[in-house]
Image (cartoon, grey):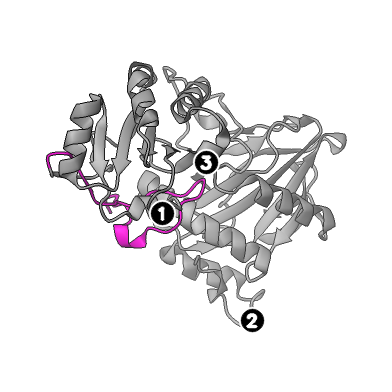
């Protein structure tokens, strides 16, 4: 099905990693406009929610050429009617769009009320909130947004690609505190070492293929329910758009640790080659402490030599049919979450191959 953003009625409070809904805005001439229009979508956006002052609008105007060089779109938003914005934009000679959010939906989502000082939201290229800049940050919002745009360009610098795996990298799926709590969950949980599915067996230890210690994050527990709720909002829409697939089901997640002292690694393998794994369609690898270890990169060697290491709280999603492995961790410990997703079309295969483990039924694994 074609990609459709969530309607304005679904807009809730914005947090890092949350996608903006398709809110109604109006240009100064009164024309309705969507930030999801193909001419605007696909580029990082600085969206400035103007307050009672005009200094930040003027500062953004001065830095407009620099934002343009960084291929970052600047948009101003007020709660004033479109006609008033037309006067304001002309008076300040703004070189960027000034939109009317007369119903205040974006302002409320950002936690602003009438009379508040301005604040600036930095969205990534698919309108997921990446950073919020407020007066409390103690510097010019325009300059802080420009510095963020420059820093992210170093990470996302355009490359000429000769080969690339069909994998989706999604940052900001969970926040730093959530990462720390999942690591603590592993530290205090019951460990299962080097477990794989092989030869019709659901669980078998095989240190020749995998050296990783896992703690199961079982569906139905508070910790797993929290993770599923976040992934439903932040990850499933991206899978739907990128792969045209509706993921509705999940296995128990695994919080895993690759320890350099143990020679942690995972040999190249596929995730759906056995009868007990045939239901799996997409794998998720969610990093929890990127930068605290060395080595341990995810590889998809059929499609090139690239090494995948999303930032902490970010993940990689790829087809379970793809060959993939994890290079040895050479220093420290790499913590991550592994999970598998599928849809209603694959649920029957899961039920048939796992009924013995769930005598009370297998309909527990529906994503919220």
Image: magenta residue range: 1-29
Q: Which residue is mark 1?
A: 113
Q: Earlier in the sequence, mark 2 or mark 1?
A: 1
Q: Nearer the viewer, residue 19 or 75?
A: 75
* C-alpha span from label 2 to label 1: 52 Å
Work out which residue is located at the far right of the displayed protein and give it. 261
Predominant secondary structure in magenta? loop
Spot occupied by residue 344 in the image (x, y as percentages of width and height) = 42, 66
Q: Nearer the viewer, residue 208 or 141?
A: 141
Q: Residue at x 45, y 56 (%)?
A: 13
Q: Residue at x 60, y 45 (%)?
A: 285
Q: Earlier in the sequence, mark 1 or mark 3?
A: 1
- Judge depth for marks 1 and 3 and give the one in front: 1
Residue 21 in magenta stretch: yes
Spot occupied by residue 348 in the image (x, y as percentages of width and height) = 48, 70
Classify residue 329 as left or right of residue 165.
right
Q: Which residue is mark 2?
A: 359
User: Which image quarter: residue 94?
Assistant: top left
Q: Earlier in the sequence, mark 3 or mark 2?
A: 3
Q: Residue at x 56, y 35 (%)?
A: 137
Residue 64 versus residue 337 in the image, above or below: above
Q: Which residue is mark 3?
A: 322
């Amino acid at each position: 099905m074609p990609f459709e953003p969530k309607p304005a009625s679904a807009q809730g409070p914005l947090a890092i990693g949350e996608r903006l809904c398709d809110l109604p805005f109006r240009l100064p001439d009164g024309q309705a406009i969507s930030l999801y229009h193909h001419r605007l979508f696909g580029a990082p956006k600085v969206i400035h929610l103007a307050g009672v002052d005009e200094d930040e609008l003027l500062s953004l105007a001065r830095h407009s050429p620099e934002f343009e060089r960084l291929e970052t779109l600047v948009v101003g938003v007020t709660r004033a009617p479109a006609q008033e914005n037309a006067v304001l934009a002309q008076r300040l000679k703004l070189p960027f769009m000034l939109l009317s959010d007369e119903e205040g939906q974006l302002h409320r989502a950002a936690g602003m009320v009438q009379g508040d000082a301005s604040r600036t939201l930095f969205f990534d290229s698919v309108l997921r909130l990446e950073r919020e800049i407020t007066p409390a940050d103690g510097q010019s919002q325009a300059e802080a947004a420009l510095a963020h745009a420059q820093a992210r360009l170093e990470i996302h610098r355009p490359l000429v690609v000769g080969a690339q795996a069909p994998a989706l990298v999604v940052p900001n799926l969970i926040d730093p505190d959530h990462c720390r709590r999942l690591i603590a969950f592993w530290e205090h949980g019951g460990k299962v070492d080097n477990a794989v599915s092989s030869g019709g067996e659901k669980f078998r230890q095989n240190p020749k293929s995998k050296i990783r210690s896992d703690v199961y994050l079982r569906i139905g527990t508070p910790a797993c329910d929290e993770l599923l709720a976040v992934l439903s909002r932040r990850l499933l829409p991206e899978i739907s758009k990128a792969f045209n697939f509706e993921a509705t089901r999940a296995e128990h997640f695994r919080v895993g640790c690759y320890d350099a002292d143990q020679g942690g690694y995972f040999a190249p393998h596929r995730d759906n080659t056995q009868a007990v794994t045939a239901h799996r369609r997409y794998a998720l690898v969610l990093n929890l402490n990127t930068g605290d270890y060395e080595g341990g990169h995810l590889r998809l060697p059929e499609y090139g030599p690239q090494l995948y290491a999303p930032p902490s709280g970010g993940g990689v999603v790829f087809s379970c049919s793809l060959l993939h492995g994890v290079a040895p961790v050479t220093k420290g410990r790499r913590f991550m979450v592994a999970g598998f997703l599928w849809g209603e079309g694959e649920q029957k295969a899961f039920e048939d191959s796992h009924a013995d483990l769930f005598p009370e039924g297998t309909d527990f694994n529906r994503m919220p």
